[in-house]
Each structure stands twice: as C-alpha cells, then as structure tokens.
C-alpha cells in the first residue's frame, strides 16, 4: 500500500473537509393530525402516510 511522501498542509486538509457538515433533517407537518414528521415516513402519532392509513395505532386507555 503506498504511503504519502510529503506532508499535506493544514490549508489543504481544511479545504477537503469543508464539505463535511451536519445537515438538518427536512421536517413536514402531518396532513391528518398536524404533528411534525420526517419526509417519507409514517406519522408516529396517527399512523397515516400521504393521507392514507398505513399503521393501525392502538388506542390508549
């Protein structure tokens, strides 16, 4: 396996690492109950996805 022959400068390393950043997840509002939901996920509160029932939620007593 080849090894580097010269040391990389701090500037060069920093330029490469500028693209490593945290991205906030995209959140939408559930059309059925109004809860905050991640995109392309079933709503955890009511169990609906795209206006259709995806998961039967048990009623709490």
Image (cartoon, rainbow, N blue to C red):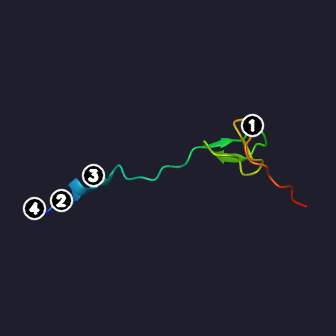
Report the mark closest to the observer, 2 or 1.
1
The CA span between labels 4 and 3 is: 17 Å
Label 4, on which residue? Answer: 6
Q: Please tell me which residue lies in front, 24 or 14.
A: 24
Q: Which residue is mark 2?
A: 9
The circle drawn on residue 52 is 1
**Is label 3 in contact with label 2 (beta carbons under 8 Å)?**
no
Tell me what residue is drawn at x 12 percent, y 62 percent. Answer: 2
The vertical placement of 50 against 46, above or below, is above
Q: Which label lies toward us, 4 or 1?
A: 1
On screen, residue 5 versus residue 33, left or right, reads left
How many other residues sit within 10 Å of disc 1, few (<14), some (14-19) or many (≥20)?
A: few
Name the mark nearer the viewer: 2 or 4: 4
Crowding around mark 2 (Cα neighbors within 10 Å: few <14, some 14 to 19, many 20+) is few
First in residue order: circle 4 vs circle 1:
4
Q: Assign a secondary structure to mark 4.
A: loop
Tell me, yes or no, whether the two marked residues, 1 and 3, touch with CB atoms within 8 Å.
no
**In x, y percent, where is residue 6?**
10, 61
Marks 3 and 2 sit apart, C-alpha to C-alpha, by: 11 Å
Q: CA distance from mark 1 to mark 3?
A: 44 Å
Which mark, by number, is residue 16? 3
Closer to the observer: label 1 or label 3? 1
Q: Secondary structure at mark 1?
A: strand
Q: Neighbour class for label 3 at 10 Å: few (<14), some, many (≥20)?
A: few
Q: Residue at x 57, y 44 (%)?
A: 26
The quadrant the N terminus occupies is: bottom left
Mark found first going from the N terminus, 2 or 1: 2
Given the current orientation, which residue lies at the most extreme top position? 51
Mark sitting earlier along the chain (1/3): 3
Foreground label between 3 and 2: 3
Q: Residue 16: x and y, percent?
A: 27, 51
- Estimate how packed mark 4 is, as few (under 14), some (14 to 19) or many (20 or more) residues with alpha carbons within 10 Å: few
């Amino acid at each position: 396996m080849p090894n580097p022959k010269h040391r990389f400068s701090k500037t060069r390393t920093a330029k490469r690492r500028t693209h490593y950043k945290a991205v906030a997840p995209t959140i939408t509002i559930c059309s059925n109950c109004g809860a905050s939901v991640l995109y392309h996920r079933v709503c955890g509160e009511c169990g609906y996805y795209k206006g259709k029932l995806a998961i039967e939620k048990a009623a709490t007593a």
